């Protein structure tokens, strides 16, 4: 195992933000889940005994038995924001002194970088080009992601979970967003730390050999099947998502508030982005299947 190369890759100025991103995501995920579990336990206790609400509030008056209607911006919010601003300022100052900016010499057409990688915030998109054609990975997928994020607030018909952490009341939303975010993080990590010269796959610890040559024979699903595999996939995935969305009484009440248009739109984005993309990646890596649907106009 080449520890020197691992250290060189991890300490590269372009890759340090990714390590910070992974550490920040892990910390805030833990903290958010911790807060959500505490709120869910409290909600269950209050549902069982509403009288407990009188003992779980911050009183504004010694004889006040109601929940405090508001929390003042000062000092509750501004002191936290001020402390966060100081911490971020110090972090950026130390970062700028300890690491050089990832600037390089002017491009030399006689000496091409290998591997040539996009900046860390685009390297996930570059990784997706391995599994999909450029028209899909570079145009359709980013467009669907942006449109899906724009539509997300309008597809959510539940009034629960607004202004407080919760897992029990927001399982579908949290699983959907978390799955999409995890896929994007995984693509960034693979594109940065796993893909070496020639965009070939190197496991952590393997030396990046610039002379290595890999001949991988890919194959497609039979063209005679046409759109049948895609249609069957959408039907099966839609059924599984519906079972997950309506598996509890609370979920069924939220589902009843959702219009048919909202639900079908959610199903389309969930099937395409959250299940279809990782499934196609798995088929390519495990079985070397490049296209599941071949047509004279496009390949998918």
Image: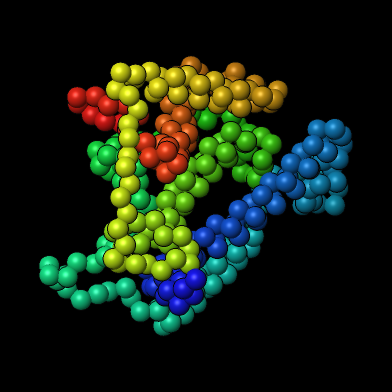
Q: Which of 165 and 23 is in front in this view?
A: 23
Q: Is residue 189 above or below residue 2?
A: above
The answer, for residue 89, to whether it is visible in the render is no
Tell whether 44 sits left or right of 296.
Answer: right
Q: Nearer the viewer, residue 284 or 192?
A: 284
Q: Is residue 61 above or below residue 233?
A: below
Residue 263: give x, y in percent of width and height. 49, 22
Give the image quarter of residue 200: bottom left
* Quarter of the image that includes the C terminus: top left
Residue 134: give x, y in percent of width and height. 25, 42
Residue lying at 33% horizontally and 75% vertically, measured from the top left: 101
Residue lying at 57% horizontally and 38% vertically, measured from the top left: 175
Q: Which of 87 and 199 is in front in this view?
A: 199
Q: How many marks?
A: 0
Residue lying at 56% horizontally and 36% vertically, measured from the top left: 173
Q: In this view, does 277 lie above or below 213?
A: above
Give the image quarter of residue 206: bottom left
Q: How is the image coloured?
A: rainbow
Residue 130: give x, y in percent of width and height. 32, 46
Q: Which of 68 and 229 is in front in this view?
A: 229
The answer, for residue 32, to whether it is visible in the render is yes
Extreme-bottom residue of the structure: 97
Residue 247: give x, y in percent of width and height. 66, 24
């Amino acid at each position: 195992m080449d520890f020197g190369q691992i250290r060189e890759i991890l300490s590269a100025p372009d890759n340090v933000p990714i390590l910070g991103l992974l550490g920040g995501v892990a910390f805030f995920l833990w903290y958010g889940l911790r807060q959500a579990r505490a709120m869910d336990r409290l909600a269950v206790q209050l549902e069982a005994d509403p009288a407990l609400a009188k003992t779980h509030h911050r009183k504004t008056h010694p004889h006040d038995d109601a929940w405090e209607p508001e929390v003042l911006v000062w000092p509750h919010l501004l002191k936290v924001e001020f402390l966060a601003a100081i911490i971020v300022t110090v972090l950026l100052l130390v970062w700028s002194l300890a690491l050089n900016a990832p600037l390089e010499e002017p491009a030399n057409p006689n000496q091409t970088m290998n591997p040539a990688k996009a900046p860390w915030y685009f390297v996930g998109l570059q990784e997706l080009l391995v599994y999909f054609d450029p028209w899909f990975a570079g145009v359709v997928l980013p467009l669907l992601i942006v449109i899906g994020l724009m539509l997300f607030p309008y597809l959510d018909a539940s009034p629960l979970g607004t202004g407080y952490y919760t897992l029990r009341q927001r399982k579908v939303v949290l699983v959907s967003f978390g799955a999409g975010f995890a896929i994007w993080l995984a693509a960034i990590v693979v594109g940065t730390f796993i893909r070496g010269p020639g965009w070939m796959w190197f496991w952590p610890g393997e030396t990046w050999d610039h002379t290595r040559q890999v001949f991988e024979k890919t194959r497609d699903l039979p063209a005679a099947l046409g759109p049948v595999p895609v249609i069957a996939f959408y039907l099966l995935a839609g059924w599984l998502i519906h079972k997950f969305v309506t598996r509890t009484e609370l979920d069924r009440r939220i589902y009843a508030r959702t219009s048919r248009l909202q639900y079908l739109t959610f199903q389309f984005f969930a099937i395409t982005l959250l299940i279809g993309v990782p499934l196609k990646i798995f088929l390519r890596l495990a079985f070397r299947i490049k296209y599941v649907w071949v047509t004279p106009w496009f390949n998918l």
